[in-house]
Image (cartoon, helix red, strand yellow):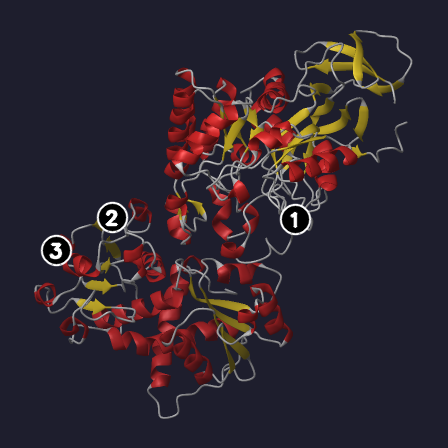
């Protein structure tokens, strides 16, 4: 594995290997000295063309805990604002000897393009490309689910049922999660209004629900809520925020109807009171902060697998 | 002016003859002719009336970095064309007599093909105010085809008026059928794959809804409509219905929509980014059958050169369009003739006779007969070619590189001048008197 562009780049055993390595990284993150020398002397760039706080910090922390040298690039205040092309930006980084490129970009496929083009020889990690994929988010979600539901078991997720709710059409999290959870043996359903859950989504998941209450009555082990963005209302995907919240929000009453064993997940950032109520988000069933913690470990594992030299560390 | 005797050449109807050419015209046609002239050995080749493209982007004026009228003319000749219609989306836009006359004159001085300018339907392609259609028609360029191609004439009233106005001089409106409201930021065919790739979908209905509206408008005002680059099976159904109803509509399909499908988009390679987008195998099949049954009248290239930079980038930033002139004949042979769907006579109709008729080019698309202009393409239909990167176009956004296609254009004659000899574009004025 040279790059991580899509969950499709991983076999099932690759994925389980990464989850298991992530579990080891979690132990490192619990030590007093949270550092491994694995990527000492390696140069990694965080190439972010889109606003992000948690993903960028998470990757930066992960790289630093593996002792890599990390440089941060954000589109604002960079040469991009002066009209530089992606090709030239990547070429510049290549000339500086960057060995790993962690890229977030507003265009779907941008990470794939960097990896396939002749612009750079670096390993490329997709940290979210447009409305396509966000593979490390899916890995950290699967790690979280596995630990919560199966404890220290190092196997797959056979028998687990996951409901993903919200703006499926525009969600890279929904795509990567569907691909990975399926690979790991889980059953997945999408839920949302038909404008945001196209029928062709049945290629990705086992079931589609347009009625959230009907879906919740099916007893899913995990309910993953997605962020709804204000711009979806402007382009008539949904009538307005209140209507969306009424039909598809994880309200207090919907939350209370769930089994106390049902996990509540959200990739963040949340719109409290819109797609998720505070009591649901802050409950013991919620894994939202745990997802953030696990994100660092998962990204350490990915960086390690892609960039650590054989036999080193 | 050179004279030629083409020996033992097979015509589209299967007859094998000799063709004598003098003073731009075919002067004799029969087996075993004696005629004192340079001999072109036609054995094993098929002669078809010179190809006519109703949809070419020559990019000049304004975008000479990607193509010029000269380089585009050479690419056309290489592909067996003797005429191309130059689309109006140049800079400045061909929405007035001055620009179309300039394009016409540059085409004439290049001399490889007849460059027939297309006029814009609306000023600056903005879809708001009709362009100087009448003046362009009365100009030296004698424009009869009008198109805002690249953009749809989406306003129903403007489209109705354009259709009506063009009637005054028997012009035709060539519509780029794409409802803009349904295709905001659209990147590829809408469906399973666009969802997987996270690319904004270009739904088929955005094309079909405009075609349905426009055939009804055409019926209402009794005018003439041409549909550019039909890309879906549903569009074919609507056009078939309209023709059965007697509506005066013609339609084109591009070589790429006859051959390529959306699966090619999977790696986000912008070479395959085109508008309308590549569709599914089912659409490809319906389009092929529509050419065979007459629903689609012509194949037109939508040759759209782009600089390297505008394709060597992320998908979302890349330009729409692909080259087409040099490979069109081989693609039509490969996808339609060699699959048994059409005859060589139909090949000649869809690539020469019909586009010339739609564009009202009286010197083009003539039957290969005594008295006709010697516009001819001689094809070696038994040879295969693997498409390479090199070509006559100034641009290299060629999606067929590495593919094997059937048929090679061996010679092209434009009004008695050999523009391509043994597959090589000739320097005009040097090899000919």
Describe residue A178's horizontal placement relative to residue B388 as left or right: left
Chain label for disc 1: B
Point 8% across, 65% down: residue: A253
Residue B191 screen position, x and y as percent: 37, 44
Does residue B354 appear anywhere in the picture? Answer: yes
Residue A204 screen position, x and y as percent: 32, 51
Q: Element at badge 2? A: loop
- Whether discs 1 and 3 lie on one chain: the answer is no
Q: Are marks 2 and 1 in contact (CB under 8 Å)?
A: no
Camera-side residue of B231 and B153: B153
What count of labels does the image hold? 3
Crowd tier of the residue under label 3, counting other residues whose Cα lies within 10 Å: few below 14, some 14–19, many 20 or above: some
Marks 2 and 1, how far apart in space?
A: 44 Å
Marks 1 and 3, how far apart in space?
A: 58 Å
Mark earlier in primary sequence (3, 2): 2
Write down the quadrant of residue A17 in the picture: bottom left
Q: Quadrant of the C terminus of chain B?
A: top right
Task: Name the residue tied to disc 2.
Answer: A194
Q: Quadrant of the N terminus of chain B?
A: top right
Task: Name the residue tied to disc 3.
Answer: A213
Does residue A185 appear anywhere in the picture? Answer: no
Point 61% across, 28% down: residue: B137
Chain label for disc 3: A
Mark in front: 1 vs 3: 1
**Mark on residue B305?**
none
Task: Name the residue tied to disc 1.
Answer: B62
Mark in front: 3 vs 2: 2
Crowd tier of the residue under label 1, counting other residues whose Cα lies within 10 Å: few below 14, some 14–19, many 20 or above: some
Write down the quadrant of residue A157 in the picture: bottom left
Q: Element at badge 1? A: loop
Marks 3 and 2, how far apart in space?
A: 15 Å
- Whether discs 2 and 1 lie on one chain: the answer is no
């Amino acid at each position: 594995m040279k790059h991580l562009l899509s969950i499709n780049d991983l076999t099932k055993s690759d994925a389980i290997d990464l989850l298991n390595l992530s579990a080891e990284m979690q132990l490192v993150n619990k030590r007093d000295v949270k550092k491994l020398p694995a990527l000492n002397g390696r140069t990694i760039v965080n190439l972010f063309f889109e606003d992000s706080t948690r993903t960028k910090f998470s990757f930066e922390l992960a790289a630093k805990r593996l002792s890599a040298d990390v440089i941060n690039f954000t589109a604002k205040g960079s040469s991009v604002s002066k009209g530089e092309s992606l090709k030239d930006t990547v070429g510049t980084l290549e000339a500086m000897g960057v060995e790993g490129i962690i890229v977030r970009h507003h265009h779907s496929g941008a990470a794939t393009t960097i990896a396939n083009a002749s612009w750079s020889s670096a390993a490329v990690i997709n940290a979210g490309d447009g409305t396509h994929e966000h593979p490390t988010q899916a890995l950290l979600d699967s790690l979280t689910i596995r630990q919560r539901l199966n404890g220290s078991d190092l196997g797959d997720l056979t028998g687990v049922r996951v409901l993903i709710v919200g703006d499926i059409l525009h969600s890279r999290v929904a795509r990567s999660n569907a691909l990975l959870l399926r690979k790991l043996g889980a059953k997945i359903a999408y839920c949302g209004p038909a404008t945001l859950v196209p029928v062709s989504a049945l290629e990705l998941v086992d079931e589609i629900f347009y009625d959230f209450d009907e879906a919740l009555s099916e007893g899913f082990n995990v309910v993953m809520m997605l962020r709804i963005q204000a711009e979806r209302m402007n382009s008539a995907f949904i009538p307005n925020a209140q209507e969306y919240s009424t039909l598809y929000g994880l309200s207090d009453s919907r939350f209370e109807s769930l089994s106390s064993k049902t996990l509540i997940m959200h990739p963040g950032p949340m719109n409290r009171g819109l797609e998720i109520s505070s009591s649901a988000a802050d409950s013991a069933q919620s894994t939202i902060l745990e997802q953030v913690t696990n994100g660092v470990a998962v990204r350490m594992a990915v960086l390690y697998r892609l960039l650590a030299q054989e036999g080193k560390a | 002016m050179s004279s030629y005797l083409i020996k033992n050449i097979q015509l589209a109807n299967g007859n094998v003859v000799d063709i004598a050419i003098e003073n731009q015209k075919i002067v004799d046609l029969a087996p075993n002719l004696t005629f004192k002239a340079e001999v072109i050995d036609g054995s094993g080749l098929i002669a078809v009336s010179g190809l006519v493209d109703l949809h070419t982007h020559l990019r000049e004026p304004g975008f000479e970095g990607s193509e010029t009228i000269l380089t585009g003319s050479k690419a056309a000749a290489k592909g067996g064309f003797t005429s191309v219609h130059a689309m109006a989306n140049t800079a400045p836009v061909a929405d007035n007599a001055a620009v179309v006359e300039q394009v016409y004159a540059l085409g004439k001085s290049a001399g490889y093909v007849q460059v027939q300018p297309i006029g814009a339907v609306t000023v600056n392609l903005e879809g708001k105010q009709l362009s100087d259609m009448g003046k362009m028609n009365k100009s030296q360029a004698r424009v009869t085809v009008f198109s805002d191609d690249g953009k749809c004439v989406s306003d129903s009233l403007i489209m109705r008026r354009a259709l009506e106005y063009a009637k005054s001089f028997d012009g035709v409106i060539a519509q780029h059928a794409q409802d803009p409201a349904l295709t905001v930021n659209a990147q590829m065919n809408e469906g399973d794959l666009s969802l997987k790739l996270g690319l904004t979908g270009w739904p088929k209905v955005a094309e079909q809804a405009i075609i349905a509206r426009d055939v009804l408008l055409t019926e209402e005002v009794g005018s003439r409509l041409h549909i550019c680059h039909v890309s879906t099976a549903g569009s074919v159904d609507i056009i078939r219905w309209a023709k059965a109803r007697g509506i005066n509509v013609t339609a084109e399909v591009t070589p790429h929509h006859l051959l390529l499908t959306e699966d090619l988009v999977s790696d986000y390679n912008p070479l395959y980014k085109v508008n309308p987008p590549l569709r599914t195998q089912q659409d490809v099949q319906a389009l092929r059958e529509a050419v065979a049954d007459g629903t689609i009248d012509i194949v037109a290239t939508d040759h759209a050169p782009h600089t390297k930079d505008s394709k060597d980038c992320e998908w979302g930033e890349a330009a729409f369009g692909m080259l087409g002139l040099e490979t069109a004949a081989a693609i039509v042979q490969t996808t339609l003739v060699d699959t048994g769907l059409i005859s060589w006579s139909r090949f000649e109709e869809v690539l020469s006779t019909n586009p010339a008729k739609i564009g009202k080019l009286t010197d083009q698309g003539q039957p290969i007969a005594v008295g006709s202009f010697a516009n001819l393409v001689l094809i070696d239909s038994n040879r295969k070619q693997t498409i390479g990167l090199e070509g006559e176009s100034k641009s290299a956004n060629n999606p067929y590189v590495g593919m094997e296609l059937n048929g090679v254009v061996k010679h092209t004659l434009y009004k008695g001048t050999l523009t391509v000899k043994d597959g090589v574009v000739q320097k005009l004025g040097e090899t000919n008197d």
